[in-house]
Amino acid sequence: MRAKKSYGQHFLINESLARNIAETAIELSEAYPVLEIGPGKGVLTKYLYEENIIFKSVEADLDMIEYLHGKFPGIDIHLIYEDILKLDLNEVFENEFILFGNFPYNISSQILFKMIDYKNKIPVLIGMFQKEVAERIIANPGNKEYGILSVLVQAYYKGKIIFKVKPGSFNPPPKVDSAVIKLERKDKLELDCDESLFKTIVKSTFNQRRKMIRNTLKSLVNDNEVLKDDFFKKRPEQLSIDDFIELTNKIEPYISFR
């Protein structure tokens, strides 16, 4: 069974690493069921299956679904043949669950945005990413990796890298190093601002990250006087999560597209 580029597949073949990754989810399985994304050939899935925990595995590749059926008798009840980006996660488990897996690298950022959309259902994420993406997710203000993913994820989750993974642990080996991150949801699920506007501001400012936020936000406000404050001379990578919340509240009364 060969990996398909169209699905961003890189099969994990390092068994000791696979067990260690799976254990991080299994340790939490008494409190939460597990939703695995992209089981592929089942290198992580088999540990969930053997431990007889409550889990579901979502796979968009029918060939992989058929392969798993042949490898693990009785696994049918755990498999969902669906594109994770189209799946209504409220229909998978009634209560909270862990988001887990060796994520397809070509949709890893979209999986994170989906996690944020369902943050009320997902207290923990444990996932494999390209190392540079993992570093971007947990980057701090002032770091060159700090950007849209950093702010939007860290607004609701705190994270850390728990495993670093070399290309040789996969077949086929990716061209980059990888890393497994663990994200744990913060206690507070809502921001002290208009969250939709918050996301718009974060994306708008980082899409022009070399500019002062004053210049980026001109097109969003109907009164440029508000932008004369020294606060708006900063660039987006200088702003913390709390700064972006403050920024959102400062300009909300002056938004032109409402």
Image: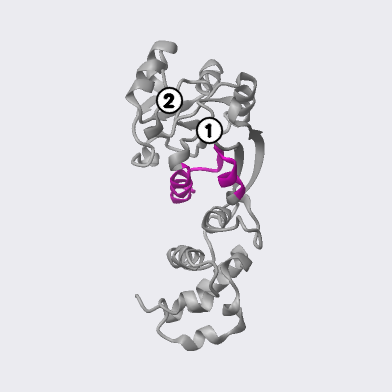
- Residue identifier under label 1: 174
Under mark 2, the amino acid is Ala
**Left or right: where 33 falls relative to 258:** right
Q: Residue at x 42, y 21 (%)?
A: 2
Q: Residue at x 47, y 74 (%)?
A: 216
Residue 165, position as x, y percentages in the image: 63, 32
Q: Is residue 127 visible?
A: no
Q: Which residues are magenta?
A: 108-135
The N terminus sits in image quarter: top left
Would you call the spot at circle 2 few (<14 residues within 10 Å), some (14-19), or many (20 or more)?
some
Residue 181 against residue 48 in the figure, above or below? below
Q: From mark 1 to mark 2, how far is it between C-alphas?
A: 11 Å
* Label drawn at residue 3: 2
Q: Amino acid at mark 1?
A: Pro
Looking at this view, is 121 or 217 the one in front? 217
Q: What residue is at 61 percent from the left and 83 percent from the top?
A: 230
* Res. 223 image quadrant: bottom left
Q: Position of residue 211 (x, y in %)?
A: 53, 73
Residue 18 badge: none
